[in-house]
Image (spheres, rainbow, N blue to C red):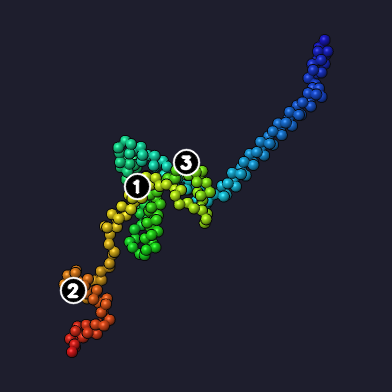
Amino acid sequence: MDSSSEASGSTNEVKTFAQKQAERMKKLRDLHRMRNEARTHNHQEVIAEDARNKLPENWESRKRRAEWILNNQKEKEEAAARGEDYDRVKLLNISAVEAERLERQKKKKNPDKGFSDFEAATVRQYNRLVKEMTPKDMERYEEQKEKYGDAFYAAPNTIIHGLHEDRAEAVDNLVKSVENQIAKRTKYSRRRTHNDDADIDYINERNAKFNKKMDRFYGEHTAEIKQNLERGTAV
Protein backbone atom coordinates (compact mmCIF):
# COMPACT_ATOMS: atom_id res chain seq x y z
CA MET A 1 0.00 0.00 0.00
CA ASP A 2 2.80 2.39 0.93
CA SER A 3 4.90 1.57 -2.11
CA SER A 4 2.00 2.10 -4.49
CA SER A 5 1.18 5.51 -2.96
CA GLU A 6 4.80 6.65 -3.26
CA ALA A 7 4.89 5.60 -6.91
CA SER A 8 1.71 7.49 -7.67
CA GLY A 9 3.10 10.63 -5.89
CA SER A 10 6.31 10.51 -7.90
CA THR A 11 4.41 10.27 -11.16
CA ASN A 12 2.32 13.28 -10.17
CA GLU A 13 5.44 15.34 -9.46
CA VAL A 14 6.90 14.62 -12.89
CA LYS A 15 6.06 17.57 -15.19
CA THR A 16 4.74 17.00 -18.63
CA PHE A 17 6.49 18.27 -21.75
CA ALA A 18 3.80 20.89 -22.23
CA GLN A 19 4.36 22.28 -18.71
CA LYS A 20 8.12 22.40 -19.20
CA GLN A 21 7.63 24.10 -22.56
CA ALA A 22 5.30 26.67 -20.99
CA GLU A 23 7.84 27.49 -18.26
CA ARG A 24 10.63 27.86 -20.80
CA MET A 25 8.49 30.16 -22.93
CA LYS A 26 7.61 32.24 -19.84
CA LYS A 27 11.30 32.64 -18.97
CA LEU A 28 12.04 33.52 -22.59
CA ARG A 29 9.31 36.18 -22.61
CA ASP A 30 10.66 37.62 -19.36
CA LEU A 31 14.15 37.79 -20.87
CA HIS A 32 12.78 39.54 -23.98
CA ARG A 33 10.88 42.01 -21.79
CA MET A 34 13.96 42.81 -19.66
CA ARG A 35 16.09 43.18 -22.78
CA ASN A 36 13.61 45.64 -24.32
CA GLU A 37 13.43 47.61 -21.06
CA ALA A 38 17.24 47.79 -20.89
CA ARG A 39 17.38 48.87 -24.54
CA THR A 40 14.79 51.61 -23.90
CA HIS A 41 16.63 52.88 -20.81
CA ASN A 42 19.96 52.90 -22.65
CA HIS A 43 18.43 54.83 -25.54
CA GLN A 44 16.97 57.40 -23.13
CA GLU A 45 20.32 57.77 -21.38
CA VAL A 46 22.09 58.27 -24.71
CA ILE A 47 19.61 60.99 -25.69
CA ALA A 48 19.94 62.68 -22.29
CA GLU A 49 23.74 62.54 -22.43
CA ASP A 50 23.76 64.00 -25.95
CA ALA A 51 21.48 66.81 -24.81
CA ARG A 52 23.80 67.53 -21.84
CA ASN A 53 26.84 67.60 -24.12
CA LYS A 54 25.15 70.19 -26.35
CA LEU A 55 24.50 72.50 -23.41
CA PRO A 56 27.01 75.25 -22.48
CA GLU A 57 29.74 74.35 -20.02
CA ASN A 58 28.31 76.61 -17.31
CA TRP A 59 24.73 75.43 -17.82
CA GLU A 60 24.35 73.99 -14.32
CA SER A 61 25.58 77.16 -12.64
CA ARG A 62 23.38 79.30 -14.89
CA LYS A 63 20.40 77.09 -14.05
CA ARG A 64 21.05 77.40 -10.33
CA ARG A 65 21.44 81.17 -10.66
CA ALA A 66 18.18 81.43 -12.65
CA GLU A 67 16.35 79.46 -9.96
CA TRP A 68 17.87 81.67 -7.27
CA ILE A 69 16.81 84.82 -9.14
CA LEU A 70 13.24 83.54 -9.49
CA ASN A 71 13.04 82.63 -5.80
CA ASN A 72 14.59 85.96 -4.83
CA GLN A 73 12.10 87.84 -7.01
CA LYS A 74 9.23 85.88 -5.46
CA GLU A 75 10.39 86.64 -1.92
CA LYS A 76 10.83 90.31 -2.83
CA GLU A 77 7.26 90.50 -4.16
CA GLU A 78 5.91 88.78 -1.05
CA ALA A 79 7.80 91.24 1.18
CA ALA A 80 6.46 94.17 -0.87
CA ALA A 81 2.91 92.80 -0.49
CA ARG A 82 3.39 92.70 3.28
CA GLY A 83 4.80 96.23 3.25
CA GLU A 84 8.25 95.17 4.46
CA ASP A 85 11.72 96.13 3.33
CA TYR A 86 13.08 93.02 1.62
CA ASP A 87 16.74 93.89 2.16
CA ARG A 88 16.15 94.37 5.87
CA VAL A 89 14.16 91.13 6.17
CA LYS A 90 16.87 89.27 4.29
CA LEU A 91 19.62 90.61 6.56
CA LEU A 92 17.67 89.56 9.64
CA ASN A 93 17.90 85.93 8.52
CA ILE A 94 21.70 85.81 8.13
CA SER A 95 24.55 86.34 10.57
CA ALA A 96 26.83 89.36 10.66
CA VAL A 97 29.78 87.25 9.51
CA GLU A 98 27.83 85.97 6.50
CA ALA A 99 26.63 89.49 5.63
CA GLU A 100 30.21 90.79 5.76
CA ARG A 101 31.39 87.91 3.54
CA LEU A 102 28.66 88.61 0.97
CA GLU A 103 29.57 92.31 0.94
CA ARG A 104 33.25 91.52 0.36
CA GLN A 105 32.32 89.08 -2.39
CA LYS A 106 30.07 91.68 -4.01
CA LYS A 107 32.86 94.27 -4.02
CA LYS A 108 35.34 91.72 -5.34
CA LYS A 109 33.11 90.81 -8.30
CA ASN A 110 32.59 94.39 -9.43
CA PRO A 111 35.19 96.59 -7.73
CA ASP A 112 35.06 100.35 -8.19
CA LYS A 113 38.60 101.20 -9.32
CA GLY A 114 37.69 104.65 -10.50
CA PHE A 115 37.76 105.88 -14.08
CA SER A 116 40.50 104.31 -16.19
CA ASP A 117 39.12 104.52 -19.73
CA PHE A 118 35.75 104.66 -21.45
CA GLU A 119 35.87 100.98 -22.45
CA ALA A 120 36.24 99.81 -18.85
CA ALA A 121 33.49 102.19 -17.72
CA THR A 122 31.16 100.87 -20.44
CA VAL A 123 31.84 97.23 -19.48
CA ARG A 124 31.19 98.03 -15.81
CA GLN A 125 27.91 99.76 -16.65
CA TYR A 126 26.84 96.90 -18.94
CA ASN A 127 27.44 94.30 -16.20
CA ARG A 128 25.49 96.39 -13.72
CA LEU A 129 22.53 96.82 -16.07
CA VAL A 130 22.45 93.10 -16.89
CA LYS A 131 22.27 92.22 -13.19
CA GLU A 132 19.36 94.63 -12.73
CA MET A 133 17.34 92.97 -15.51
CA THR A 134 14.26 91.02 -14.42
CA PRO A 135 14.12 87.24 -15.06
CA LYS A 136 12.94 86.15 -18.47
CA ASP A 137 9.20 85.63 -18.94
CA MET A 138 9.27 82.45 -21.02
CA GLU A 139 5.49 82.41 -21.51
CA ARG A 140 5.52 85.88 -23.05
CA TYR A 141 8.60 84.88 -25.06
CA GLU A 142 6.74 81.95 -26.61
CA GLU A 143 3.67 84.12 -27.26
CA GLN A 144 5.75 86.71 -29.14
CA LYS A 145 7.57 83.97 -31.03
CA GLU A 146 4.26 82.54 -32.21
CA LYS A 147 2.80 85.97 -32.93
CA TYR A 148 5.64 87.39 -35.06
CA GLY A 149 6.59 84.15 -36.81
CA ASP A 150 9.59 84.58 -39.11
CA ALA A 151 9.95 88.22 -38.08
CA PHE A 152 10.84 87.14 -34.53
CA TYR A 153 14.35 86.21 -35.72
CA ALA A 154 14.78 89.04 -38.18
CA ALA A 155 16.78 88.40 -41.33
CA PRO A 156 18.57 91.17 -43.31
CA ASN A 157 15.49 91.74 -45.50
CA THR A 158 12.87 91.43 -42.75
CA ILE A 159 10.78 94.52 -42.05
CA ILE A 160 10.05 94.67 -38.32
CA HIS A 161 9.10 98.35 -38.07
CA GLY A 162 5.71 98.70 -36.42
CA LEU A 163 5.44 95.07 -35.31
CA HIS A 164 6.81 95.43 -31.80
CA GLU A 165 4.87 97.39 -29.21
CA ASP A 166 6.67 98.49 -26.07
CA ARG A 167 4.92 97.73 -22.81
CA ALA A 168 4.19 100.59 -20.45
CA GLU A 169 6.09 98.72 -17.73
CA ALA A 170 9.19 98.42 -19.95
CA VAL A 171 9.05 102.14 -20.82
CA ASP A 172 8.75 103.06 -17.13
CA ASN A 173 11.75 100.86 -16.30
CA LEU A 174 13.79 102.54 -19.02
CA VAL A 175 12.85 106.03 -17.82
CA LYS A 176 13.67 105.08 -14.23
CA SER A 177 17.03 103.64 -15.25
CA VAL A 178 17.98 106.76 -17.25
CA GLU A 179 16.93 109.05 -14.40
CA ASN A 180 19.01 107.03 -11.94
CA GLN A 181 22.04 107.27 -14.24
CA ILE A 182 21.62 111.03 -14.57
CA ALA A 183 21.24 111.46 -10.80
CA LYS A 184 24.30 109.34 -10.16
CA ARG A 185 26.35 111.15 -12.79
CA THR A 186 25.70 114.53 -11.20
CA LYS A 187 27.41 113.38 -8.00
CA TYR A 188 30.70 112.65 -9.69
CA SER A 189 33.31 114.72 -11.49
CA ARG A 190 36.50 113.74 -13.22
CA ARG A 191 39.18 112.93 -10.67
CA ARG A 192 42.32 115.06 -11.01
CA THR A 193 45.41 114.09 -9.09
CA HIS A 194 47.15 116.80 -7.07
CA ASN A 195 50.91 117.09 -7.38
CA ASP A 196 52.40 118.22 -4.07
CA ASP A 197 55.82 118.89 -5.66
CA ALA A 198 54.47 121.30 -8.29
CA ASP A 199 55.31 125.01 -8.01
CA ILE A 200 52.65 127.13 -6.32
CA ASP A 201 52.05 130.05 -8.67
CA TYR A 202 48.46 130.82 -7.76
CA ILE A 203 46.63 132.62 -4.98
CA ASN A 204 43.35 130.64 -5.03
CA GLU A 205 41.62 127.78 -6.85
CA ARG A 206 40.20 129.99 -9.56
CA ASN A 207 43.59 131.53 -10.27
CA ALA A 208 45.14 128.04 -10.43
CA LYS A 209 42.68 126.99 -13.14
CA PHE A 210 43.36 130.19 -15.08
CA ASN A 211 47.14 129.65 -14.88
CA LYS A 212 46.77 126.07 -16.13
CA LYS A 213 44.70 127.24 -19.04
CA MET A 214 47.23 129.93 -19.95
CA ASP A 215 50.10 127.45 -19.63
CA ARG A 216 48.30 125.03 -21.92
CA PHE A 217 48.17 127.57 -24.75
CA TYR A 218 51.25 129.76 -24.18
CA GLY A 219 53.51 127.66 -21.95
CA GLU A 220 55.95 126.62 -24.67
CA HIS A 221 56.34 130.23 -25.82
CA THR A 222 56.83 131.74 -22.37
CA ALA A 223 58.94 128.98 -20.76
CA GLU A 224 62.22 130.86 -21.27
CA ILE A 225 60.82 134.17 -19.95
CA LYS A 226 59.47 132.36 -16.88
CA GLN A 227 62.83 130.75 -16.17
CA ASN A 228 64.65 134.09 -16.50
CA LEU A 229 62.20 135.73 -14.07
CA GLU A 230 62.73 132.92 -11.57
CA ARG A 231 66.56 133.25 -11.87
CA GLY A 232 66.41 137.04 -11.78
CA THR A 233 68.24 137.37 -15.11
CA ALA A 234 65.38 138.79 -17.16
CA VAL A 235 66.30 141.74 -19.36
Say which label, 1 or 2, has the lower sequence index.
Answer: 1
SS label for mark 2: loop
In the picture shown, does residue 54 fall above or below 2?
below
Residue 144, x across and y down, in percent:
48, 44
Residue at (81% x, 22% y) in the render = 16
Identify residue for label 1: 172
Say which label, 3 or 1, has the lower sequence index.
Answer: 3
In the picture shown, does residue 196 fall above or below 115?
below
Q: Is residue 28 left or right of residue 99?
A: right
Q: Is residue 234 left or right of residue 183?
A: left
Q: Quadrant of the N terminus?
A: top right
Amino acid of disc 1: Asp
Instruction: For marks 3 and 2, give the CA distance.
Output: 66 Å
Instruction: For marks 3 and 1, give the CA distance.
Output: 21 Å
For residue 202, the mark is 2
Residue at (31% x, 52% y) in the render = 179
SS label for mark 3: helix
Badge 2 density bin: few <14, some 14–19, many ≥20, Cα 10 Å: few
Residue 135, x across and y down, in percent:
42, 45
Residue at (37% x, 45% y) in the render = 168
Nearer to me, 63 or 133: 133
Say which label, 3 or 2, has the lower sequence index.
Answer: 3
In the image, which is nearer the foreground, mark 1 or mark 2? Answer: 1
Amino acid of disc 3: Glu
Nearer to me, 153 or 92: 153
Can the viewer see residue 2? Answer: yes
Residue at (19% x, 69% y) in the render = 206
Identify residue for label 3: 139
Badge 1 density bin: few <14, some 14–19, many ≥20, Cα 10 Å: few
In the image, which is nearer the foreground, mark 3 or mark 1? Answer: 1
